[in-house]
Image (spheres, rainbow, N blue to C red):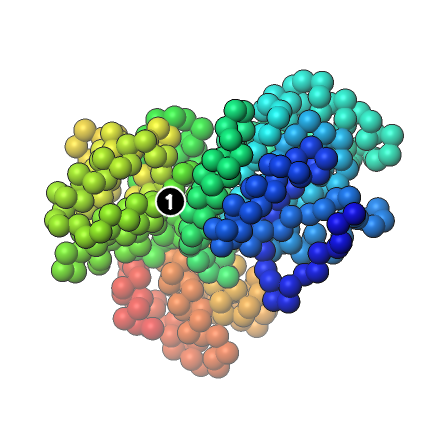
Amino acid sequence: MAPKRKRTSGTTYQVFLSFRGPDTRQGFTDVLYWALTEAGIRVFRDNEDIRDGEDIGEEILTAIEESRIFVPIFSTNYASSKWCLIELAKMFKSKEASIGKKTILPIFYDVGVDDVMLKTKLYTRALSKHRKNFSTDIVHQWKEALRDAGKIKGWELKDTGYGEFARSFARVVSMKLKVKHKCVTDYLVQRDDQVEALMELLDIESSDVRFVGIHGMGGIGKTTLAKLVFNKLCDRFDSCSFLADVRESSRQHKGIELLQKKLLGDLGLRLGEIMDVDDGIIRMRERLAHKKVLIVLDDVDHSNQIQNLAGDASWFGSGSRILITTRDQSVLEIRRQRVHILEVEKMNPEEALRLFSLHAFDKDSPPNRYLTLTQKAVASSGRLPLALKLIGLLLRDKRRKEWVDTIKRLERILHPDVQQILAVV
């Protein structure tokens, strides 16, 4: 029997492997584990044979919470193990709570997708046996976790050699760990209707290459919306890139060339210096045509920026998505390219009041004695998220007189936009 593994002090895990020991440990899982660790990735590999008691161990729970990537290795007897099913359910729960920061990469070792989706007898028989010892609710959770895992595009081992597969898989994991998720404010009033509308336009299940534009006035929340969806979806693509503030960056010396270089680097292609814009375009056409990528071009103000960074659907692999944010809808009129468009609307009064209160009072609603002043501040902000945040932070912990004076200055702005509000506050 193998000794229990001691946790190294200060170690945090990046990848969690879930597997049925008797099926895969002596062979495939060992090879995969060492390929990942050789790539510098911190991997948690559980040993189900040495577990004590009936409950999932604290070390396993901690490893699941820490890890960014979960790798269930589905094999013939995976669903026969209560531990594997418990881990799988915990993985999905952790992924859902992460708002897109965690991902699940399933490997189908000696079973097919249909087996995991419970379309064959292999796993359905195993689950039937679990009903003798576990409640209907728990078995249902396991069923849902298996079906959800089967919906994720994974890797089928088939006839591939273990070493070749493991090295290739380690490269994929390394690339995904380098994806920097976009920081979203702690005080977030997520507008689910906007997120759902954008997800519908993106339609990531479709195999076409799709351009989607988000437009609206400055400070209305276009970038935040793009970040939320980027974080939610980036693990569904081969590679991802978020180019922030394209408008300002492109004005710098060789700005477009630098953006092209960053884009290619984000997508895993390090090709040295880019001589000029045309050189960058040629490289993108040559190297991205077979990659499924997610690209965000944030704050674009000229159609040439789009043409030079993501000019045509033919540049990208099947299923790629190009998301563009801009204040000017006319920028999205790209030659020979259809762009699906979403206009971001102002927050409704209730959402605006909550966002302002979070920044001004650290709670969802204002104290009663500040309710009227808060309503006036929200009205004078134009219900623009950035303005609500700035005004809320400015008035935080201030005396009533300062509230009154600031609101009076804001109320003089007839048609508020962020720049006018910044000038006043």
In the figure, 61 relative to 82: above or below?
A: below
Can you name the residue that lies furthest to the top here? 120
Task: Name the residue rendered at 42%, 64% in the picture.
Answer: 389
Residue 97 visible somewhere in the drawing = no
The residue most toward the right is 132
Q: Secondary structure at mark 1?
A: strand
Residue beneath the point at 22% across and 58% down: 248
- Image x and y of residue 187, in percent: 50, 61
**Relative to 363, 330 lies left or right:** left
Say if residue 243 shows up in the picture: yes
The residue lying toward the viewer, choosing from 364 and 374, is 364
Whole-percent x and y of residue 133?
87, 34
The reply, left or right, for residue 372 in relation to residue 295 is right
Residue at numbered disc 1: 240
Amino acid carrying label 1: it is Cys
Task: In this rendered view, identify the residue nearer to me: 190 or 381.
Answer: 190
Q: Position of residue 296 (x, y in %)?
A: 33, 45
Number of disc labels: 1
Task: Identify the residue at horizontal 37%, vertical 63% (top origin).
Answer: 387
Q: Quadrant of the C terminus?
A: bottom left
Residue at the spot x=58%, y=51% of the render?
43
In the image, residue 365 above or below residue 336:
below
When asked about the image quadrant of residue 255, the answer is: bottom left
Classify 10 Å Cα crowding around label 1: few (below 14), some (14-19), many (20 and above).
many
Q: Position of residue 211 (x, y in %)?
A: 30, 35
